Amino acid sequence: MSEDYDSNQVIYRVDYRHEDGEVWRHYYSDKDKVDALDMYARHISQYGKEQCRLVRTTAGTELYKYTPVYQKETEDE
């Protein structure tokens, strides 16, 4: 069941990548920050912080990205 989001509505997105991977993939999205943080916490408890990030976004614009400070960023995100 997919929800339609208004293009200006804030969405919290959880992304993941495979170990040593450079491509981020969508894992989960929610309008509710608490639910998205819960999913983020569940993901990192299973796979580790290096493979997961939380992004605050709208349909068209990335507003905020939480990536642990020791995690490498890639240029082509």
Image (cartoon, rainbow, N blue to C red):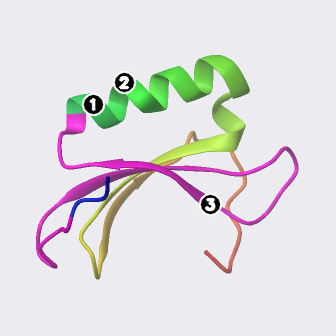
Q: Is residue 61 left or right of residue 28?
A: left
Q: Residue beneath label 2, please?
A: 38
x and y percentages locating residue 27 in the rendered image: 53, 49
Mark 2 or mark 3, which has the lower sequence index? 3
Question: Is residue 36 positioned above or below 23 on the image?
Answer: above
x and y percentages locating residue 72 in the rendered image: 72, 54
Q: The disc labelled 1 sits on which kind of residue?
A: Asp
Q: Which quarter of the image is occupied by the C terminus?
A: bottom right
Q: What is the number of the mark on residue 35?
A: 1
**Kind of element beneath mark 3:** strand
Q: Residue beneath label 3, please?
A: 25
Mark 3 or mark 1, which has the lower sequence index? 3
- The boundaries of the magenta stretch are 4-33
**Mark 2 crowd level (few <14, some 14–19, many ≥20, 10 Å Cα):** few
Q: The disc labelled 3 sits on which kind of residue?
A: Arg
Look at the image and say whether residue 42 sits in the magenta stretch: no
The span from disc 2 to disc 1 (Cα, nearest Å) is 5 Å
